[in-house]
C-alpha cells in the first residue's frame, strides 16, 4: 500500500464536502450544510489568505481523506486555550472512505505526515491535536502514532483531549573519535568477559553484538572460540581490528546497529553487552530484539545485559521534576585521567543534559581531551542518549520479539536478582 500527500486544490472541495457529510466523519466534524459554506471555509487557506496547509491523503493513487496543519500560535484564541507556545504545529485528520477505517491506516498516515510534512519545517518542535474525548478510535490512532495526552479542555462546548508528539532528534552515541580511543586503551577488563564466556563456550558460533573495540571479543578469540563481532561505530570496529592484528587473530567484523543486524551466518549464542538502548529510538530497540532473534540458529540463546534505572543515585534523582529543572548539569571539576603507552594523557568528563521520565531517556555529554604534557593535542565533545528499561518491561519486549523463554539473572552472577543488583542479565531463547 502506497501513501502520499497531495496539496489540496479548489477542485477537491466538492469531494471534501461530500466526505464531511458521511456519517462516520460528520459525527465528529459537524460540517457546514451547504457546499458554498464549506468552500468559503477552506478557500482562504488554499489562496494563501489563512496560515494553514491542506492536503489530500492518497492511498494507492486514490484520494481517501484530508489533513490540515498549521502553527497553533497563528490562531490566538486556540493558543489561549492550549497554551503550547511558539514552534508547535496543529494537525487535523479524517479518513473519508469508511471501509478504510479501523484498519490502522489513520495511525500510519499520522506517523508519516508528521515526519514528512510537519517536522520538515526546521522551526517546528512539536505537533498537537485536539480530539474529542468520546472519539475512542481517533484517540487510539494518535496514541499509536506516538502522541501522548497532555491536557483536557472544553472548546465550543465539547470536551477534548490535547495530544502531543515532540520532535525527536537523531539518536545519539559518543563511541567515536577520542572516545573510541579511550575504550580501546583503557576499557579492557570487567566481570562480563568471564561470565559470558561460559555461555559462548557452550554455544558456537557466537556473535558479540556491540563489540566495541573488543573488550569481550578479543579474550574469547585468544581462547580459540568461534566468535564474530559487530558494532554501530566504524571507529570502534577499526580499533578492534588493529588490536586483533596485534594479538594475531583475524575475526569477522562488520559495522551494523542492532536494529539493522543482518549477519552472513546464524549463531548459537549472541551476547549484547552494554549496548541495548544506547543511541536508539524505542522503535529501533524493538526492531533490534527481533533482528537478534532472527540472527540465532534454532534453539540459540541471546544474552543481553541492562543497568537498572536506579543504579546511579545521582542520575535516578534527576527523574524528579525539581532535579530536572537544574539540567543541563555543569561540567564537573574532577575528571578521569589515564595515560596511554605512548605517553598521551586522556582527560574525560561527563555530565547529564536532560532526563525524560516519560520516555525513560537520559541524554548525557562527554568531553575528552588528549594531551601530551602541557600541549592540548585534541578535544571532542559528544552526546549519548540511553533509554532505561525496567525488568518486566524488557521481558515483555523480548517475548513480543518472539523469544519463548526468558530468564533474568543477577548481573554476572549465577543467582536470582535482587533490588540491590545494578545490572540484570536476560537469557532468552
Image: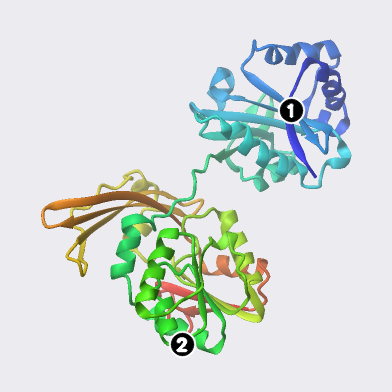
Residue at 38% over, 50% down: 383
Farthest-out residue, left: 374
Residue at 48% over, 50% down: 171
Say which quadrant the N terminus sits in: top right
Return the residue at label 2.
224
Up the image or down, 171 lies above or below 194; here it is above
Say which quadrant the C terminus sits in: bottom right
Task: Check disc 1 and report its element: helix, strand or loop.
Answer: strand
Task: State the image coordinates of residue 31 (x, y, percent, origin top left).
Answer: 80, 21
Classify 10 Å Cα crowding around label 1: few (below 14), some (14-19), many (20 and above): few
Q: 73 and 174: which one is in front?
A: 174
Answer yes or no: do the residues labelled 1 and 2 have beta carbons within 8 Å? no
Q: Tell me which label, 1 or 2, sits earlier in the chain.
A: 1
Up the image or down, 57 lies above or below 309; here it is above
Q: Is residue 313 left or right of residue 223?
A: left
Return the residue at label 1.
6
Q: 166 and 300: which one is in front?
A: 300
Q: Toward which corner of the image does residue 411 lie, by quadrant? A: bottom left
Q: Toward which corner of the image does residue 99 lie, by quadrant? A: top right
Residue at 41% over, 84% down: 222
Task: State the image coordinates of residue 84 (x, y, percent, origin top left).
Answer: 51, 30
Task: State the image coordinates of residue 376 (x, y, percent, origin top left).
Answer: 17, 51
Disc number for residue 330: none
CA gap, disc 1 to disc 2?
A: 59 Å
Amino acid at each position: 500500500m502506497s501513501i502520499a500527500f497531495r496539496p489540496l486544490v479548489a477542485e477537491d472541495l466538492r469531494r471534501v464536502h461530500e466526505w464531511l457529510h458521511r456519517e462516520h466523519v460528520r459525527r465528529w466534524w459537524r460540517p457546514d450544510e451547504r457546499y458554498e459554506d464549506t468552500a468559503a471555509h477552506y478557500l482562504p487557506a488554499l489562496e494563501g489568505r489563512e496560515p494553514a496547509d491542506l492536503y489530500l491523503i492518497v492511498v494507492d493513487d486514490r484520494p481517501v481523506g484530508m489533513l490540515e496543519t498549521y502553527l497553533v500560535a497563528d490562531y490566538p484564541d486556540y493558543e489561549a486555550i492550549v497554551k503550547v507556545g511558539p514552534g508547535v504545529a496543529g494537525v487535523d485528520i479524517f479518513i473519508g472512505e469508511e471501509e478504510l477505517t479501523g484498519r490502522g491506516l489513520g495511525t500510519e498516515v499520522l506517523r508519516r505526515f508528521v515526519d514528512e510534512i510537519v517536522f520538515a519545517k526546521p522551526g517546528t518542535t512539536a505537533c498537537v491535536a485536539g480530539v474529542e474525548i468520546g472519539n475512542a478510535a481517533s484517540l487510539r490512532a494518535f496514541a499509536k502514532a506516538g502522541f501522548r495526552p497532555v491536557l483536557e479542555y472544553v472548546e465550543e462546548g465539547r470536551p477534548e483531549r490535547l495530544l502531543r508528539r515532540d520532535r525527536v532528534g537523531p539518536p545519539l552515541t559518543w563511541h567515536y573519535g577520542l572516545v573510541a580511543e579511550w575504550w580501546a586503551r583503557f576499557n579492557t577488563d570487567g566481570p562480563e568477559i568471564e561470565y559470558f564466556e561460559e555461555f559462548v563456550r557452550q554455544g558456537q558460533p557466537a556473535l558479540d553484538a556491540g563489540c566495541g573495540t573488543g573488550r569481550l571479543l578479543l579474550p574469547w578469540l585468544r581462547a580459540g572460540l568461534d566468535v564474530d563481532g559487530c558494532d554501530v561505530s566504524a571507529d570502534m570496529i577499526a580499533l578492534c581490528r588493529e588490536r586483533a592484528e596485534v594479538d594475531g587473530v583475524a575475526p569477522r567484523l562488520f559495522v551494523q546497529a542492532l536494529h539493522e543486524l543482518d549477519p552472513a551466518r546464524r549463531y548459537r549464542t549472541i551476547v549484547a553487552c552494554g549496548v541495548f538502548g544506547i543511541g536508539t529510538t524505542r522503535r529501533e530497540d524493538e526492531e533490534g530484539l527481533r533482528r537478534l532473534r532472527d540472527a540465532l540458529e534454532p534453539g540459540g540463546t541471546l544474552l543481553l545485559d541492562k543497568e537498572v534505572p536506579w543504579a546511579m543515585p545521582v542520575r535516578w534523582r534527576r527523574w524528579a521534576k525539581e532535579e530536572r529543572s537544574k539540567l543541563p548539569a555543569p561540567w564537573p571539576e574532577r575528571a578521569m585521567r589515564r595515560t596511554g603507552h605512548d605517553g598521551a594523557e586522556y582527560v574525560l568528563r561527563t555530565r547529564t543534559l536532560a532526563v525524560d521520565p516519560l520516555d525513560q531517556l537520559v541524554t548525557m555529554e562527554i568531553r575528552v581531551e588528549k594531551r601530551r604534557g602541557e600541549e592540548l593535542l585534541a578535544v571532542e565533545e559528544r552526546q549519548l542518549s540511553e533509554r532505561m528499561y525496567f525488568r518486566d518491561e524488557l521481558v515483555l519486549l523480548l517475548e513480543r520479539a518472539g523469544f519463548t523463554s526468558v530468564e533474568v539473572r543477577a548481573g554476572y552472577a549465577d543467582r536470582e536478582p535482587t533490588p540491590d543488583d545494578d545490572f540484570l542479565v536476560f537469557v532468552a531463547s
